[in-house]
Image (spheres, grey):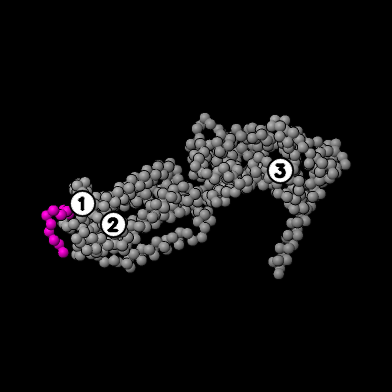
Amino acid sequence: MTASRALARLVLGATLAATGALAAAVDDLLQQFHAQGGHDFTVAAGEKLWQQDFKDAKSGESRRCALCHTNDLRATGKHAVTGKAIKPMAPSVNPERLADAAKVEKWLERNCKWTLGRSCTPQEKGDVLTMIRSR
Amino acid sequence: MKCFDPSGPPGPEGVFPERLPRVRVWDAPTRLFHWTLAAAFAGEWLTRDARYIDLHEFLGYAIALLVAFRLFWGVAGTRWARFASFRPTVAGAARHLASLARRTPEHHAGHNPAGSWAIHALLVLAALQVATGLVTLGAEERLGPLSGRFSYALGDSAHAVHEALAWAMLGVVALHVAGVIAGSILERQNLVASMLTGLKRASAASAVEAKRGVAFALAAVLGMAALAYFRGDAFDARAQPRAVPLLVQDAEWASQCGDCHMAYHPSLLPARSWAALLARGADHFGEDLSLDDATRVRLAMFAARNAAEAHASPAAWKIATTTPPANAPERITDTPYWKQRHARVAEIGAVHASDCGACHRDADGGSFSPRAIRVARAVPGKGS
């Protein structure tokens, strides 16, 4: 009984810590994007950007976030080139998704470059991050 | 029984075989040995592909057991099973072949002097195949009882000898079968059936005991060897802790590379390839890796230390030694070794070429042992 109670306490503690870290990481990033000129981040604006099509200058192919990550952020995605499975974006089903601020920044940079052909503006990053967090 | 006929065939029996009764000349253990060895030899040919390494290795042990038994039975067995009854002599073989050419074959109750050469050659070749097979397995793949005792280079040579001897053995088998067919026709008796039933036309004095108990014991030993070998999962139970080399891993490498594709172990490309690939991070097969300098340097150092040249695994040694020094391939699938090993793998088109794990269960660890190959898992478009 003591063992299972200790385990329960451990799981609870870890969950709280993870949630706390997630909240802290996203809040810090949103604050940062705000300081860089973004304002009034909304889920609707993030959703619009997520679905928007962009034409790749080099290959001429159409690219958008949902191409790899799918329309449903709670579903498992698939890398467009390598075919590797991509864990769900939604923190509600994949709690580690927004926990590491450095990782979030790296992937916003990389994937904006691939999808939009340029870095995203602080406004765009803030909107998408707000949308992802809501799922 | 013995009736002299001056026009009859020469040879120890001295009469036409049709006039002789059918008596048992091959005891049960000799017949069991013959057919299990024949089946094992056929099985070795069928399992020569790396993906069947477990079965191929087991058949090798079975052949070792069979050859050892035959050496013992060649001394302790019944009359016609003993080596003393079929000494391989040049004169004897020449005389026998000449009698076949004249279509009046010498009749022998046991093995004829030409067949004796085939039997001795097959026993010696089988023993050599066991030896070269064990050296290849231990040196080239770091598997089996001789695991890691010899250099990769020696394993490579042993492998070449093993393949050449397999063809030599197949040649001797072909001669042996041709001899049996010719003998059967000319002697007008089915020698293949004789090896199954043990019965052959010969003088009553030539008959031997069946020795079924010894055959049962041999079968039991082979059965127990199979049980011991195939108990549990060969890959998980035996190879993983002992023989598959555990390569150096790095958490940062695993996450930086592994987010988009399998985190290919650095031992799968030469150091010069990794240097070129990481230097061109802004165009990584069309994508910008967006690596900061500190991260890129750490990844480059891990790659340089553990590149193919470190020979951490058999695959690493092969890639390091077969990639021309002037080439720095940035795709593992562009290395000569990868191409050579997958040229005849029909299933390769069904999986994404970057999904090594579809067939190699140890792909994430980077060891790529043949023992970990499970081609059945190949499912089109499945991510790792």
Highlighted magenta segment, given as a residue range:
B1-11
The answer to which image quadrant residue A130 occupies is top right
The amino acid type found where label 2 is placed reads Asn
User: Which residue has dot 2 on it?
Assistant: B190
Coordinates of residue B300 in the picture (x, y in percent): 61, 37
Q: Residues within 10 Å of mark 1 (few under 14, many from 20)?
A: many
Q: Residue A78's x, y, as percent?
A: 68, 45
Which residue of the protein is positioned furthest toward the bottom in this rendering? A1
In the depicted structure, whether residue B110 falls above or below residue B248: below
| Horizontal arrangement in the rendering, residue B44 relative to residue B73 (left or right) | right
- The residue at the point 76 percent across, 46 percent down is A71
**Dividing the picture into quarters, in which one does residue B80 lie?**
bottom left
Which amino acid is tagged 3?
Cys
SS assignment for the magenta stretch, majority:
loop
Q: How far from the left and from the top, in percent, is residue B225?
A: 42, 61
Residue A23 sits inside the magenta stretch: no
Total labels: the figure holds 3
Q: Residue at x 64, y 32 (%)?
A: B280
Comparing marks 1 and 3, which lies closer to the viewer? 1
Return the residue at label 1. B105
> Which disc number belongs to residue A68?
3
Q: Secondary structure at mark 1?
A: loop
Residue type marked 1: Pro
Disc 3 crowd, CA 10 A, few/some/many (<14, 14-19, 20+): some
Identify the subunit bearing mark 1: B
Query: Are tags 2 and 1 found on a single chain?
Result: yes
